[in-house]
Image (cartoon, rainbow, N blue to C red):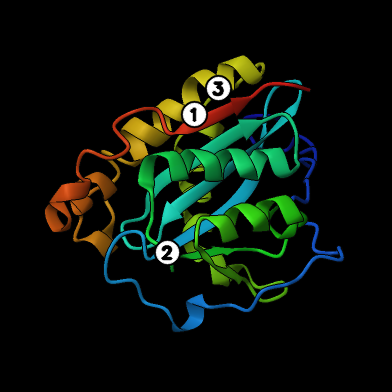
Amino acid sequence: MRESDLLVKSKRKWLCTTDSRHGFRIWPNLCRQATPTGINQVWVADLTYLRLLWEFVYLAVILDAFSRRVVGYALSRRLDASLTLGALGAALADRRPPPGCIHHSDRGVQYACGDYVKRLTEAGFRISMSRRGNPFDNAQAESFFKTLKWDEVNLTQYRNFEEAAASIPAFIEEIYNRERLHSALGYLSPVEFEAKLHPAAAGQNMAHQGVLISTP
């Protein structure tokens, strides 16, 4: 029956990571009229869940919309503002964007809450959020998550947070950023694309640009 694909297939549990039912301000979508011409002009942020053998963990990432490069990320057992703040802090520590850079995300409470907006405002970002129920407004981040799950997560059975924390950063930093080719980048990797057009940025993100939050 297994060989003939006749076994009953259990439905995989699905988790919703976006809670937009909150009282915080919803910011207008600035990305619909913004086409970046260089790095650190538009950042896109999003988060997702990853299924492990015994638990779920959560990954927040920030990408540079021009180069598709992951500039900051955080992996955590907790789906709260500490996750998104961890990714933002890692990206800011390494990238140091100029005032006026657009930060685009969904309307979730992890991005709309006071602590996160305060950090964005202090860093001089212009805040942008997707339209309600429109994942295409954050297509680059969605595409990254699809690549991560298809090429890494779905091929590996992580037993616990520690195993995921040992593999996922290596995929982000060494495989995706440095080896994954993008047709939109002339079939270059994000690091190669930045080095070609922005040589001064070639040395950025050489170190670990992520945060691992293991506290339950």
Q: Is residue 189 left or right of residue 13?
A: left
User: Which amino acid type is marked by label 2?
Assistant: Pro
Question: Which badge, 2 or 3, comes first in the chain's sequence?
Answer: 2
Q: Which residue is mark 1?
A: 168
Q: Nearer the viewer, residue 13 or 9?
A: 13
Image quadrant in which you'd find residue 202: top left
Please report the residue visible at 68 percent of the width from the left and 26 percent of the height from the top: 52
User: Which amino acid type is marked by label 3?
Assistant: Ala
Please report the residue visible at 44 percent of the width from the left and 52 percent of the height from the top: 63
User: Which amino acid type is marked by label 1?
Assistant: Ile
Q: Residue furthest bottom?
A: 33
Q: Verify CB contact (< 8 Å) between mark 2 and mark 3.
A: no
Please report the residue visible at 61 percent of the width from the left and 20 percent of the height from the top: 158
Q: Which residue is mark 3?
A: 165
Q: Which residue is mark 2?
A: 99
Vertical order, 130 against 57 (above or below):
below
Question: Which badge, 1 or 2, comes first in the chain's sequence?
Answer: 2
x%, y% of residue 100? 43, 69
x%, y% of residue 128? 58, 71
Image quadrant in which you'd find residue 178: top left
Q: Nearer the viewer, residue 30 or 9?
A: 30
Q: Residue furthest front?
A: 122
Question: Mark 2 Cα within 10 Å, few/some/many (few <14, many 20+)?
Answer: some
x%, y% of residue 61? 53, 46
